[in-house]
Image (cartoon, helix red, strand yellow):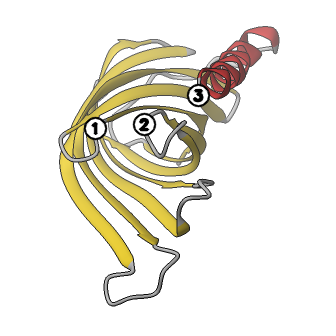
Amino acid sequence: MIRKAGKLILLGSLLLLLPLLLPLSIQAQKNAGDTEVGLGVAYGFDIATDGELGINGSVYYSVTDRIRLGADAIYYLLNDPQFQKPSFFELNLNTGYHVVNQEVFRAYLLLGMHYASFRYERPVRAADSEESDNEIGLNIGGGIEFDHESIILFLEPKRSIGGFDQYSITVGGRIVF
């Protein structure tokens, strides 16, 4: 688990340092009315035995230059041999507050709601061979963003509380419309 987490943190660090090594364009800070669509890679530290990678998609809308509302979904790529046909996903509704809102760099806090669903089949066929669980909880976390031309690179650690308690970290990019 530590080895996987270390690789993900290294990858995230490299992605975040990339904009510092490339010429940065001057862009405006977050403005009310901005809409962002993003893709990323997530790592859930407490999924299965050693944690798992996932695919993240998100949409955010800036209500003011400091506050934004958003939704994201993560589908985890489970690879645990003890489960057959495993499926784990989460849906999140978050509110973000930019504590730093500059032209190229931003830092934010987030708070939101979390819905998670886990399902798998047991190797033995019976009336109850399928196990599933759905949970609702809260998200608390934060993140940093770097503008690089038309793509915003981000790193977002968060903690889900209630239901499936876990830490996760997401790295990726967003496009502003």
Residue type at numbered disc 1 = Asp
* Residue 173: % across, % down: 62, 37
Q: Residue at x 55, y 59 (%)?
A: 82
Disc 2 crowd rating (10 Å Cα; few below 14, some 14-19, many 20+) is some
Query: Of helix, strand and loop, which one carries label 1?
Result: loop
Vertical arrangement, residue 165 with respect to residue 26, above or below: below
Between disc 3 and disc 2, whose residue precedes?
3
Q: Which mark is residue 46?
A: 2
* Label 2–label 1 contact, CB within 8 A: yes
Q: Nearer the viewer, residue 16 or 100?
A: 16
* Label 1–label 3 contact, CB within 8 A: no
Is residue 24 at all visible to an observer of this figure? no
Query: Of helix, strand and loop, which one carries label 2?
Result: loop
Disc 1 crowd rating (10 Å Cα; few below 14, some 14-19, many 20+) is some
Q: Quadrant of residue 142?
A: top left
Q: Quadrant of residue 94?
A: top left
Q: Which mark is residue 1?
A: 3
Question: Which residue sits furthest right?
Answer: 22
Residue type at numbered disc 3 = Met
Q: Quadrant of the N terminus?
A: top right
Determine whether, in the image, residue 71 is placed left or right of residue 63: right
Q: Residue at x 32, y 90 (%)?
A: 127
- Number of residue marks: 3
Vertical arrangement, residue 7 with respect to residue 57, above or below: above
* Label 3–label 2 contact, CB within 8 A: no
Residue type at numbered disc 2 = Asp
Query: Of helix, strand and loop, which one carries label 3?
Result: loop
Q: Residue at x 70, y 29 (%)?
A: 149
Q: Nearer the viewer, residue 151 or 16?
A: 16
